């Protein structure tokens, strides 16, 4: 019997229209054996949570470059808690070092900026969703 591939949501929150990095991550995760749902640009936190619920996702990856990461990720985490969704959330993009700690305090599983290797991201995702 073949195990279903863990499903990962990759989303762009807010008004940020730059999605090249998110697409690169989505492709790398798909090639590593995950089922990836890329939600596209300009998603709201509630849309992302709804997608995660509908898809029975095992992890959410948020790409954000707009500078509104604290507000948007805070809202995402609040909605997840409200709806009883407890899966890891990773944040990638341009995040000032002083904001990384605030995101981790919100319950984010990790914050990754430019220069993080695809191998490192794949290894982190595998560890978080329990795939060897």
Image: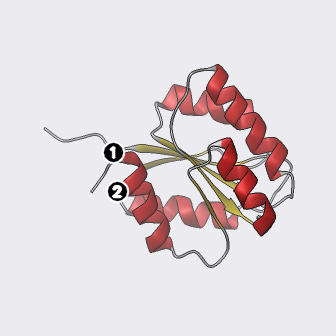
Relative to 2, does residue 103 appear above or below in the rendering?
below
User: Tag count in the figure?
Assistant: 2
Residue 45 visible to an observer of this rendering: yes
Outermost residue toward the bottom in this view? 115
Q: Estimate the x, y position of residue 17 in percent, counting from the top left.
A: 81, 57
In this picture, residue 36 sits left or right of residue 39: left
Residue 62 badge? none
Quickly name the residue at label 2. Answer: 33
First reached walking from the N terminus: tag 1 or tag 2: 1
Q: Residue at x 50, y 62 (%)?
A: 27
- Identity of the residue drawn at 78% across and 59% down: 99
Q: Position of residue 95 (x, y in %)?
A: 76, 64
* SS under mark 2: loop
94 or 10, which lies in front? 94
Residue holding disc 1 = 5
Residue 118 appears at what percent x and percent y? 50, 72
Q: Quadrant of residue 113?
A: bottom right
């Amino acid at each position: 019997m073949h195990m279903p591939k863990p499903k990962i949501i990759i989303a762009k929150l807010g008004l940020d229209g730059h999605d090249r990095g998110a697409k690169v991550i989505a492709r790398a995760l798909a090639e590593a054996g995950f089922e990836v749902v890329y939600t596209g640009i300009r998603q709201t936190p509630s849309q992302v949570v709804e997608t995660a619920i509908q898809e029975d996702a095992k992890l959410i990856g948020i790409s954000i470059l707009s500078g509104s990461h604290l507000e948007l990720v805070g809202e995402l985490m609040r909605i997840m808690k409200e709806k009883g969704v407890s899966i890891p959330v990773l944040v990638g993009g341009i995040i000032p070092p002083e904001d990384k700690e605030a995101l981790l305090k919100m319950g984010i599983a990790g914050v990754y900026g430019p220069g993080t290797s695809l191998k490192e991201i794949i290894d982190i995702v595998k560890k978080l969703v329990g795939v060897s």
